[in-house]
């Protein structure tokens, strides 16, 4: 059993107690990162190496060596970008965070120089045009590199190119500011008295106090200094969801909801600037909107294709979503004994949770007892061993390699193929850490020679809470989240591409979330859960009836959740789409979309979208989650469902999908894997077949 990370580290120290057994290295195994200021040298060396490669490429005749040398430039620069990004989001030492931040901006500026380097662009044009690229992957790499140059504006006149470079830098800085505001300015609400919050969740909130409101008798006594105890509820996503789910006092829920959906106010202006910068950038590049620019290289091919798909899906789901809304509203009216009371957005989590619990008698504490984090990590090992014949082995880290005592490092090992890659796990929440769950690349895989392969290195980062000295227990939604991110990790670890440009998740956006969505299904399947979800005392597996109840609970309001994802996607596409007037009032626009595409009220004065970080990372691309869900649902039903843990299922997943990363055309990849019916042509682009999704949601 994998124990709490800190205990593992202590055991590792005992086993490797001499300095010689724990060689000194730097952060993530990069020697240059032994100190925070090492990031400066990391950038200097990357710039120097990429300049050497540019000079080398300038001397080469048209050949595949040009593509390989450009991929090495990409590998060199991405190692800095990816390491700095992980450091900025997870390192507890402020100096490391600040140096990582500076390194990120410096290397991004150098990347802009590389993306507008005519020596590189002309070299790739010649290599493409003279027919010297002999493999499909090399030709695709050359094509992608050329497109990347052109997306950077290299073909534009000098004045326009300079403006594009300025806009790209501004867009990057605005995105960083948007995300920093989310992390540092979540907002809060103080609730008095503390008794309005259930005791079972009070430990999640900070204790506060104020002078107690006094009556006439108390006011006459100057010695009365009694203070009233309260609780401060930070409006970050995790704390917010806990309060909205468990607090019975509707006024508290209302205050918490408004606080959580009205911060950070600073991001209203940041988003306005970002929309304008992306719009000007896209129009300078010859596109009618940023959405058009972002979607053009994807399977969907145009924003119009995506919007038509989303509107059709919105219409399809509306009737069932309205039925579910009415069911929840009627339940609230019975509970409140008020026939005309309205259902408000702050009621959703509370009453849905209550309805699920009463219908299926699922006790969250009982469920969590089967999912201590150590057992869940064992579950990840069960997956790779059953599906791929590989195992995760914990390996010691060098001094300076880790960024926190809770971090552990695993190698993915195959008995015949050796190590396949390496994964850091940083799973516990702490102050100043990235607030969600995410997969971070550190180094992509690539072919170095006929006999040598550069193994991928990734980090899987979550924010599970734990009491001191005890392993965390996960609720089942946390288990699903862990499996989701693990799907990304497997994509990175199992891809075997010639070029790091295609390694793992470096794929067309339309399919990037497919493995992660697919592995969510594994988190709900009893045949999978019984292999690792064991009672801590008896060792008995989780009862099948409990898993059936969990699934029945999940399936109670599927249209409501699907409708929410459609709304998010349409909102994202609208904000970065064509606008008839400027400036766009994003608050009014989002409010209007919520009324049109969901069954729920918009709460005046709120602006939830200013904390939706996907607007930065997936600008005009959030629809890809829905594409991926459609693809993953079809793959599950057609490939995995009959025998999800069989080696034949694993071989199909690895050999026909995961190993290709982004090296194969995504539509051909999907059709070869699942069959022609998995996608459909529509309006000059490609959309997913929704048959399996409709069946799953009961439409």
Image (tube, rainbow, N blue to C red):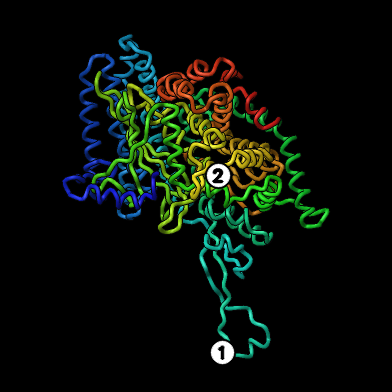
Q: Which residue is drawn at 54% across and 29% down?
A: 628
| Residue 682 found in image quarter | top right
Which residue shows up at 36% across the image and 48% down it? 88
Picture coordinates of residue 172 (x, y %)?
41, 41
Q: Which of marks 1 and 2 is nearer the N terminus?
A: 1
x and y percentages locating residue 446 in the rendered image: 31, 25
Quadrant of the image containing the C terminus: top right
Q: Is residue 383 above or below residue 399?
A: above
- Residue 523 drawn above or below residue 433: above
Disc 1, disc 2: CB below 8 Å? no
In the picture, measured across the screen, residue 529 lies left or right of residue 322, that is: left
Q: Is residue 454 visible?
A: yes
Res. 118 in view: no
Picture quarter containing residue 141? Answer: top left
Q: Residues within 10 Å of mark 1 (few under 14, many from 20)?
A: few
100 or 630, which lies in front?
630
Q: Mark 2 points at which residue?
A: 476
Give the farthest residue toward the right.
Answer: 339
In terms of depth relative to the viewer, which is nearer, 419 or 77? 419
Q: What element carries label 1?
A: loop
Find residue 390 and report its image quarter: top left
Q: How crowded is mark 2: few (under 14 residues within 10 Å), some or many (20 or more)?
A: some
* Residue 693 point in image, percent of width and height: 63, 28
Mark 1–mark 2 distance (CA, rounded to whole Å) = 51 Å
Report the number of numbered marks: 2
Residue at far front of view: 538
Q: Give the residue pinned by disc 1.
A: 223
What mark, if any, has residue 302 been given in the picture?
Answer: none
Q: In this view, does 646 lie to the left or right of 215?
A: left
Q: Position of residue 98 (x, y in %)?
A: 33, 52
From the image, state whether disc 1 or disc 2 is nearer to you: 2
């Amino acid at each position: 059993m994998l124990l709490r990370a800190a205990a593992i580290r202590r055991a590792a120290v005992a086993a490797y107690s001499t300095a010689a057994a724990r060689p000194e290295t730097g952060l993530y195994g990069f020697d240059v990162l032994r100190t925070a200021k090492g990031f400066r040298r990391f950038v200097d060396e990357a710039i120097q190496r990429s300049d050497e490669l540019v000079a080398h490429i300038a001397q080469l005749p048209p050949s595949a060596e040009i593509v390989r040398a450009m991929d090495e430039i990409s590998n060199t620069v991405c190692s800095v970008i990816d390491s700095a990004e992980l450091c900025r989001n997870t390192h507890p030492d402020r100096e490391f965070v600040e140096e990582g931040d500076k390194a990120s901006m410096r290397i991004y500026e150098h990347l802009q120089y590389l993306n507008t380097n005519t020596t590189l662009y002309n070299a790739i044009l010649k290599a493409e045009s003279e027919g010297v690229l002999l493999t499909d992957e090399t030709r695709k790499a050359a094509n992608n590199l050329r497109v990347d140059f052109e997306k950077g504006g290299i073909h534009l006149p000098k004045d326009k190119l300079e403006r594009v470079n300025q806009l790209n830098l501004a867009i990057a800085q605005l995105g960083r500011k948007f995300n920093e505001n989310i992390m540092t300015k979540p907002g809060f609400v103080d609730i008095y008295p503390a008794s309005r919050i259930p005791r079972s969740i009070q430990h999640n909130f900070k204790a506060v106090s104020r002078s107690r409101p006094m009556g006439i008798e108390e006011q006459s006594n100057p010695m009365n200094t009694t203070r009233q105890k309260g609780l401060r509820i930070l409006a970050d996503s995790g704390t917010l969801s806990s309060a909205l789910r468990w607090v019975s006092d509707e006024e508290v829920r209302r205050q918490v909801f408004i606080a959580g959906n009205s911060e950070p106010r600073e991001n209203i202006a940041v988003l306005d600037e970002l929309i304008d910068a992306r719009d000007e950038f896209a129009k300078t590049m010859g596109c009618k909107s940023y959405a058009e620019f972002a979607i053009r290289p994807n399977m969907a091919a145009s924003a119009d294709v995506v919007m038509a798909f989303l509107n059709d899906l919105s219409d399809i789901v509306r009737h069932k979503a309205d039925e579910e809304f009415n069911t929840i509203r009627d339940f609230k009216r019975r509970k409140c004994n008020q026939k005309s009371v309205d259902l408000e957005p702050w009621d959703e989590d509370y009453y849905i949770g209550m309805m699920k619990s009463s219908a299926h008698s699922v006790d969250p504490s009982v469920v969590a007892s089967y999912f201590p984090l150590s057992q869940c990590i064992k579950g990840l090992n069960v997956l790779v061993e059953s599906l791929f014949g590989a195992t995760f082995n914990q390996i010691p880290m060098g001094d300076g390699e880790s960024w926190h005592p809770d971090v552990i490092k695993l190698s993915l090992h195959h008995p015949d193929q050796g190590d396949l890659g390496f994964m850091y796990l940083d799973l516990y929440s702490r102050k100043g850490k990235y607030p969600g769950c995410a997969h971070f690349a550190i180094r992509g895989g690539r072919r170095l020679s006929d006999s040598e392969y550069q193994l991928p290195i990734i980090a899987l980062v979550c924010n599970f809470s734990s009491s001191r000295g005890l392993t965390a227990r996960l609720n089942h939604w946390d288990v699903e989240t862990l499996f989701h991110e693990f799907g990304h990790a497997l994509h990175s670890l199992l891809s075997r591409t010639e070029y790091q440009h295609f390694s793992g998740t470096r794929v067309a956006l339309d399919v990037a979330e497919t493995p992660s969505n697919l592995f969510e299904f594994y988190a709900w399947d009893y045949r999978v859960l019984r292999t690792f979800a064991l009672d801590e005392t008896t060792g008995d597996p989780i009862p099948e009836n409990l898993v059936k109840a969990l699934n029945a609970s999940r399936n109670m309001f599927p249209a409501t959740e699907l409708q929410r994802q459609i709304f998010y996607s349409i909102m994202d596409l609208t904000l970065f789409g064509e606008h008839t007037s400027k400036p766009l009032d994003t608050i009014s626009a989002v409010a209007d979309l919520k009324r049109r595409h969901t069954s729920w009220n918009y709460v005046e004065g709120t602006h939830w979208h200013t904390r939706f970080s996907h607007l930065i990372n997936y600008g005009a691309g959030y629809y890809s989650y829905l594409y991926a869900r459609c693809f993953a649902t079809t793959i599950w039903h057609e490939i995995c469902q009959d025998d999800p843990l069989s080696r034949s299922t694993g071989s199909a997943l690895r050999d026909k999908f995961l190993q290709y990363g982004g090296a194969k055309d995504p539509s051909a990849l999907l059709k070869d894997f699942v069959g022609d019916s998995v996608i459909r042509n529509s309006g000059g682009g490609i959309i997913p077949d929704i048959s399996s999704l409709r069946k799953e949601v009961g439409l």
